[in-house]
Image: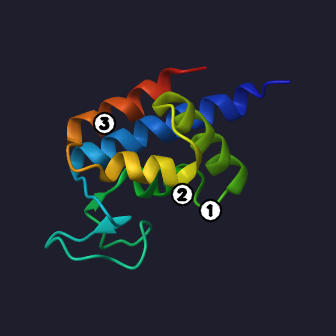
């Protein structure tokens, strides 16, 4: 049975992740600071740019002020389905592809945020 509250939270997280990536995007690491240096966590207050997976983690944390694994898992499932990739590694590889552009990542997150 579908959980409408969880579905709404997933959509909100993915839309917020799109905003994060729109503000700053990176590849090959979850997050970077304003100087482009890696930060220890996507949740760090120093983070200024995020990869797709880092942005989802940060957005989920921002929404519930905690690490909610069930919410993250639902977000990953929705994003994997949208991108047609397998596993979280598939999302990271998609984000890190040399030809990938920031706007593509933003658009994918927004598409995933609209899927119900």
Residue at the disc numbered 3: 106
Q: Are marks 2 and 1 in contact (CB under 8 Å)?
A: yes
Q: Closer to the observer: label 3 or label 2?
A: 3
Please tell me which of labels 3 and 1 falls first in the chain.
1
Q: Find residue 59 and report its horizontal and vertical position in percent.
A: 47, 50
Q: Find residue 38 and report its horizontal and vertical position in percent.
A: 28, 76
Q: How many numbered badges does the structure rendering display?
A: 3
Residue drawn at the location 49% of the way across and 48% of the way down: 90
**Of helix, strand and loop, which one carries label 1?**
loop
Please tell me which of labels 2 and 1 falls first in the chain.
2
Q: Residue 13, relative to residue 70: is it above or below?
A: above
Residue at the disc numbered 1: 66
Q: Find residue 65 and report its horizontal and vertical position in percent.
A: 58, 59
Q: Is residue 81 left or right of residue 108?
A: right
Residue at the disc numbered 2: 61
Q: Residue 65, relative to residue 116: is it above or below?
A: below
């Amino acid at each position: 049975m579908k959980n409408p509250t969880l579905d709404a939270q997933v959509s909100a997280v993915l839309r917020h992740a799109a905003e994060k990536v729109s503000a700053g995007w990176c590849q090959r690491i979850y997050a970077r600071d304003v100087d482009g240096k890696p930060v220890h966590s996507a949740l760090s207050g120093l983070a200024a740019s995020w990869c797709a997976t880092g942005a989802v983690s940060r957005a989920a944390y921002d929404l519930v002020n905690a690490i909610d694994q069930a919410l993250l898992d639902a977000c990953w499932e929705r994003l994997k389905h949208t991108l047609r990739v397998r596993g979280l590694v598939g999302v990271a590889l998609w984000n890190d592809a040399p030809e990938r552009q920031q706007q593509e990542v933003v658009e994918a997150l927004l598409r995933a945020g609209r899927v119900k």
